[in-house]
Image: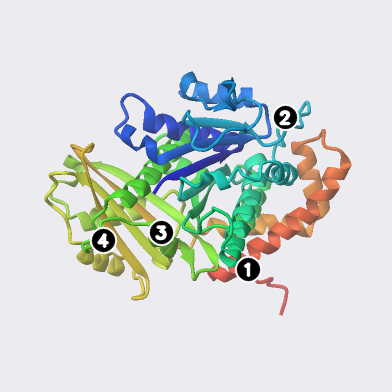
Amino acid sequence: MRAFILGSGGCGIKMLADLYVFINKPTSKYKLLDRYFGFFGGDLEEGVKSRRMCIERGVPTDAFGRKGSSGEDSDTMFNFRIPSAKPFNLFEISKNKDERGGVDKTWYLAMEPAKEFIKENHSFFNETEPYNWINLINSGGGGTGNGVNPVFLDWLHHKTSNNAKTKKDTYTLDKLITSTIILSVRDKLQYANSAANIGRSAMYCDGIILADNDHISKISKSSNDYENVINNQLNHVWVRMITASISCGDGSAKSNYDIRDFEGRFRVHGNYAGPIVPCFHEFSMDEVKGINLDFVVNLTIREHALVECDPEKSKAVLVIIAVPQNYKFISPHHKMSEFLRKQLKLDDNVRVDVLYNYSNVLTNSIQVTVLLTAPYIPIFMTLFEHLKNYVSDPDALRDMIYQKAPYLPSKYLDKAPGEYKEAYNKFKDYLEFLGYDVKDKNQK
């Protein structure tokens, strides 16, 4: 499995840069995996600004992609074939600039530039053919990535659907499409924006990988370092998804976990993307000495989830355990599956997969990655209530947006209620499908 990683907006590009450095820094254990990743970042703001931000986060200047045959820097427009001669590629989603740059928290203003980008650069996703996993990253509560990525997902969804009917084009259906959404919910508007982001993405991908800044800040030893904790955890999760697709033992003749395996575990009954809660922790050998791996995995689920959730409501569980080559204390996959099923009180129809990844870069530790599909996620109801409140009071919504972006012309403020209402309906439908109680208590 090869991954096309697209970070949109400030948060998405920062996370993209951190993943690149995580894999490529001189001391990285994972440098050989670089060939399995393509790094792409898009923003409404100037490419020079994005590039400077990435350099500050450790991306070397000679890593950036070039455009065309003239060798000019790709700071201003996307115009190169994929895969690029260089590994890290930035592009501007819009050529139309104003003095503001981005769109702050007004995500609906980023939708039209995204549609124009696809129209003018329709071969953008066609040229991702070497990649069979497409992962879009953005901040749920923000503006640019929140507005852009669901538009890209919508286009990808209809592209693959049309190809299935006509069998035209070179774009294949054998792609895992995921959206990684960071819940940076620090105020009421970001709560509403995160709900809108999830609702607008749910029908257009296979899985929505979630991480919650507030949750991690509460459980982290250093509450000021939660962003680095989330980035580090997600970097390991993405790497382990790749290594599982390359070589993992599950106790059967099958030696790896392919695209259709991930699709089957992530999607909820084939209609909506499953909300995916990742859990990750690296244990030293001293920590796990004399302890059954079954208990180590259960501890990872209970204490190291990136979103507060009830794992006992999960629709599927995927466990990837990376161990040193000479590790001998393996718990048979079927026994661990049975153990976890009992511990989590899961129904017999819930699939629990356990994969072992024997690693030659781990010497004195083991890494446990767990992906929970559609557990009960309490913050979903909080997000829903905030979005509902804004939809029911358009004046309050306009006031909140005006506080965030007082320079916006009134026509853009007037556009907000309709866009939020549409997103609200989508998020409500999604939650109802997942089994959440979102009925209006005042209605009979």
Question: What is the spatial separation of the Cα atoms under label 3 and label 1, in whole angstroms?
Answer: 29 Å
Q: Nearer the viewer, residue 93 or 214?
A: 93
Label 2: how many Cα within 10 Å (few below 14, some 14–19, many 20+): few
Mark 1 and 2 residues: CB-CB less than 8 Å, in contact?
Answer: no
* Residue 240 in the image: above or below residue 157: above
Name, please, the residue furthest toward the bottom. 444
Of helix, strand and loop, which one carries label 1?
Answer: loop
What is the three-letter code of the residue carrying label 1?
Val
Report how far apart the C-alphas of labels 4 and 3 lie in the structure.
Answer: 14 Å
Image coordinates of residue 253 in percent, x first then y, are: 22, 63
Q: Which residue is mark 2?
A: 101
Residue 387 % position (x, y):
69, 56
Disc 4, disc 1: CB below 8 Å?
A: no
Q: Is residue 287 above or below residue 271?
A: above
Looking at the image, residue 374 lies above or below residue 62: below
Question: Which quadrant is the C terminus positioned in?
Answer: bottom right
Mark earlier in primary sequence (2, 3): 2
Please give left or right for residue 135 compared with residue 403 in the image: left
The mark that comes first in sequence, 4 or 1, is: 4
Q: Could you tell me the amino acid type at mark 4?
A: Lys
Q: Position of residue 400 (x, y in %)?
A: 76, 44
Name the residue: 21% across, 62% down.
251
Residue located beneath label 3 in the image: 262
Callout 3–callout 1 Cβ contact below 8 Å: no
Give the foreground label among 3 and 1: 3
Residue highlighted by disc 4: 254
- Whether pointer 2 and pointer 3 mark residues with C-beta atoms closer than 8 Å, the reply is no
Q: Is residue 33 left or right of residue 122?
A: left
Callout 3 secondary element: helix
Q: Around disc 1, counting alpha carbons within 10 Å, would you say few (fewer than 14), some (14 to 19), or many (20 or more)?
A: few
* Of residues 260 and 44, the one drawn nearer to the viewer in this rendering: 260
* Marks 4 and 2, how far apart at CA: 50 Å
